């Protein structure tokens, strides 16, 4: 086994062994600081200047900005250090111990996406004796799998800055230049309870919610007509009614009901524009029905992402990878890095189909091609 590949496997083994689950559930949620500190140790040894950016008050959640070289341009190789929760009983091997079987590397985060960091480091070390004309930045974030607070902290801080950014999410080394956004909201309809024998004694919140749902479904059809995009496998925005709660007894007029839904927009409109349209529609309904209707976000959303097909980064990535830029349905940190002024794509080893499930794995035949691809990108943007 080549020395570089041995190092990649050893480093990935150490990263997988450090649990760094992020979750909206406090039961599961934990910090990523041990992962960040280990990456910083390796990167400092490789000649990078490392800045650890605390994201939580306690500092147990943090971003890492590791920089080698200086200048106004350069390249960011970015990834997140957290993983989703896991059900150990459904794994064929220990999820926190890297296991090699059938030319596959099994372990939590092996493909989504701790596996990207040893490969980025291996590509960077190919230039260990070279003076970079523009900076190479390796960026590691926290909480991508839950709140995106790591990426939000970067935007608030206005760094890092570079000419281009590649996020190493698993795409089988195919450049991705578009993805849908995501937002999740609750709608609460508040009426007035009363005895069910006389409807005039109350104002039924469930009946009001019926009108809300009907309006949301009509709006969904409008969005599909306005923002259809054939680049996506599901070519239109999706709006899913996730759960509904309301009332407490059959013989009481329902005083309050609550709906949770998600909406995944194609590029063409930002989340804030769509949210404003929904608020306006709900305000009209509230007036018509004499009900209180409130819209609240359940998570901080992620905007739709699009990098222009004729941008330098997309064209370089297409040439080097041999694949046309694609569109995917899952959301990433790409819109946040774009806000920092960088051309951005998503392109990394492994398949998203292996992520977020038991026996997650990275194919070993992705390792050397990824290193070679990243090496060429560094050469293009930093030399």
Image (cartoon, rainbow, N blue to C red):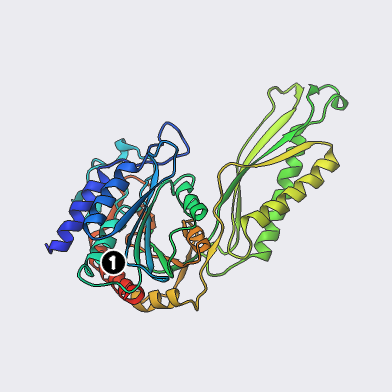
- Front-lying residue, 264 or 156: 156
Whether residue 215 is visible, yes or no, is yes
- Residue under label 1: 370
Residue at 80% across / 44% down in the picture? Answer: 285
Residue placed most toward the observer, 7 or 93: 7
Q: Residues within 10 Å of mark 1 (few under 14, many from 20)?
A: many
Res 94 quadrant in image: top left
| Quarter where residue 77 is shown | bottom left
Judge from the rendering whether residue 79 lies leftward or rightward of residue 375; answer left or right. right
Residue at 30% x, 75% y is: 379
Residue 334 horizontal/vertical position (percent): 47, 60
Q: Nearer the viewer, residue 5 or 139?
A: 139
Q: Is residue 94 above or below residue 134?
A: above
Residue situated furthest right in the rendering: 200
Where 228 falls versus 201 (above or below)? below
Considering depth in this image, is 35 or 173 the residue closer to the camera?
35
Question: Where 372 sits versus 211, above or below?
Answer: below
Q: Residue at left 62%, top 55%?
A: 271
Q: Secondary structure at mark 1?
A: helix
Instruction: Please provide percent x and percent y for residue 282.
Output: 76, 46
Q: Is residue 202 left or right of residue 29?
A: right
User: Does residue 108 show up?
Assistant: no
Quadrant holding the C terminus: bottom left
């Amino acid at each position: 086994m080549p020395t570089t590949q041995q190092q990649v496997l050893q480093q990935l083994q150490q990263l997988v062994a450090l649990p760094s689950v992020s979750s909206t559930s406090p039961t599961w949620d934990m910090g990523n600081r041990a992962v960040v500190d280990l990456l910083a140790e390796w990167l400092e040894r490789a000649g990078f200047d490392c800045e650890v950016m605390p994201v939580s008050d306690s500092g147990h959640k943090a971003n890492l900005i590791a920089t080698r070289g200086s200048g106004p341009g350069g390249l960011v190789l970015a990834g997140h250090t957290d993983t989703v929760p896991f059900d150990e009983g459904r794994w064929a091997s220990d999820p926190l111990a890297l296991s090699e079987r059938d030319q596959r590397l099994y372990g939590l985060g092996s493909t989504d996406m701790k596996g990207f960091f040893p490969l980025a480091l291996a590509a960077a070390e190919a230039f260990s004796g070279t003076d970079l004309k523009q900076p190479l930045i390796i960026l590691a974030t926290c909480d991508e799998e839950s709140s995106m607070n790591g990426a939000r902290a970067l935007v608030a801080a206005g760094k890092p800055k570079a000419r281009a950014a590649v996020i190493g999410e698993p795409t089988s080394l195919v450049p991705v230049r578009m993805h849908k956004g995501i937002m999740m909201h609750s709608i609460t309809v508040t009426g007035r309870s009363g005895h069910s024998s006389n409807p005039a004694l109350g104002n039924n919140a469930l009946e009001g919610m019926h009108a809300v749902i009907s309006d949301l479904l009509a709006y969904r059809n409008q969005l599909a007509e306005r923002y259809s995009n054939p680049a996506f496998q599901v070519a239109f925005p999706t709006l899913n009614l996730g759960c509904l709660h309301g009332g407490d007894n059959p013989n009481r007029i329902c005083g309050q009901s609550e709906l949770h839904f998600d909406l995944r927009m194609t590029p063409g409109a930002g989340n804030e524009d769509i949210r404003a349209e929904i608020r306006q529609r709900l305000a009209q309904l509230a007036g018509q029905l004499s009900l209180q209707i409130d819209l609240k976000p359940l998570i901080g959303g992620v905007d739709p992402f699009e990098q222009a097909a004729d941008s330098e980064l997309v064209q370089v990535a297409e040439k080097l990878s041999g694949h046309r830029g694609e569109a995917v349905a899952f959301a990433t940190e790409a819109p946040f890095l774009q806000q920092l002024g960088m051309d951005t794509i998503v392109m990394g080893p492994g398949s998203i189909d292996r992520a977020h499930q038991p026996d997650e794995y990275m194919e070993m035949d992705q390792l050397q091609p990824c290193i070679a691809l990243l090496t060429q990108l560094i050469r293009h943007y930093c030399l």
